[in-house]
Amino acid sequence: MTETVRWAVIGTGRISESFVPDLQSAAAHSVTAVWGRSDERTEAFAGAHGIPTWSLDLDDVLGRDDIDAVYIATPPATHVSIALSALDAGKHVLVEKPMAMTAEDTAEIFARAEARGLFAMEAMWMKFNPLHRAVHAQVTDGLLGEPRHLRAAFGMPFPAGGSRWNAELGGSTVLDQGIYPVTLALWMLGPVATVTATGRVRDGIDIAAHVTLEHDGGRVAQLGCSIVEFIDPSAAISGTAGWIEIPAMFWATDSAQIHAGSTQALFHTPDLLSHPREGNGYTPMIRAVNAAISAGLMQHPDHDAAATIATARVMDTVRAAIFDGDL
């Protein structure tokens, strides 16, 4: 039996607007309170989503006895301080990606959660998406033979404004968009041995990156991200016996094409792999988090500290290369 998890939502931006309906529709969840920086916006958010309590006082929200867990969807540079405060207040944490600005800070969140006996996870919904899990199963089951190569990118011009364009708030195409290609590469191809990266910086923000990862066993991933231009936002995993294409937007899509398993699929008509999205796409992850918390786990085995920190270390290396080692 899973227990009802009572949530507070920290942040009232676009991601929270999509996340909260899925949280409320998933079984064994309730949203008790929301925190924001603006009276008008926070009150409106609470009213629109039927959340009984709203506040501009973070300590007040974190100190409530009717909250078990917090979902943190504020700008990336604020994630660590809020997550640590929530854990110190005895709350489980689900932190929007990137969990933190660096691997060191990411590790600190997990260490604090372990010290407090609480659950912590980065909200990497892609790893709980049924489509992506099915692709991963095909790869690990050997449909592609030995996986050798992966390509993935998330590049598109974003209008000025918001945290993406604010270095002090954690603006970074690598952390905001590149995290998806990097996460996919490590998930499908395993540990990384070498990272090579180039990119561009504007006003203290990495605005574009082109990355080559050499994985253990000679596997290679070629990745890209940008907030100033389009880079084909699809992905493909290739092996000695075929390949799988994940169309745009690869991190959120519900179908893939399998070019493997038969001559027809390889050279003529690929097989279709399809798993329709549930809600806004967060529901499978939310259920997994609820089950983990109810079971008394401090990490989710499908996206644990080791996986999250490994991705963060790659992003640290990429950003250091783009900024010529000066971050």
Image: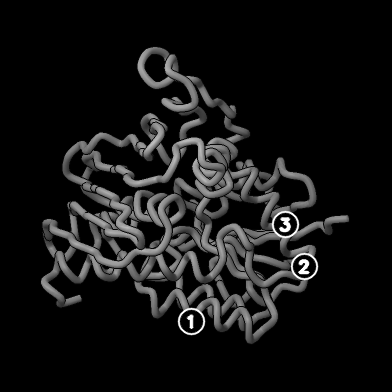
Q: Is residue 183 above or below residue 152?
A: below
- Identify residue for label 1: 108
The picture quadrant where one finds residue 88 is bottom right
Q: Is residue 192 left or right of residue 45?
A: left
Q: Residues within 10 Å of mark 2 (few under 14, many from 20)?
A: some
Q: SS of the residue at dot 1?
A: helix
> From where the camera sits, is residue 161 visible?
yes
**Quarter of the figure that contains the C terminus:** bottom left
Mark 3 or 1 closer to N-term? 1
Calculate the distance from the C-alpha at mark 2 to the C-alpha at mark 1: 26 Å
Label 3 sits on a secondary structure element that is: helix
- Judging by the rendered image, the residue that carries numbered circle 2 is 66
The image quadrant of residue 209 is bottom left
Which residue does the image show at 35% across and 59% down from the upper left? 217
Q: Is residue 284 above or below residue 103?
A: above
For label 3, the crowd category at 10 Å Cα-Cα, with few meaning under 14, some 14 to 19 and many 20 or more, is: many
Q: Amino acid at mark 1?
A: Glu
Query: Do the numbered discs 3 and 1 sit on residues whose CB atoms are within 8 Å?
Result: no
Q: Quadrant of the N terminus?
A: bottom right
Label 2 or label 1, whichever comes before in sequence order: 2
Which of the 4 quarters of the picture holds residue 33?
A: bottom right
Image location (x, y in percent) of residue 278: 62, 33
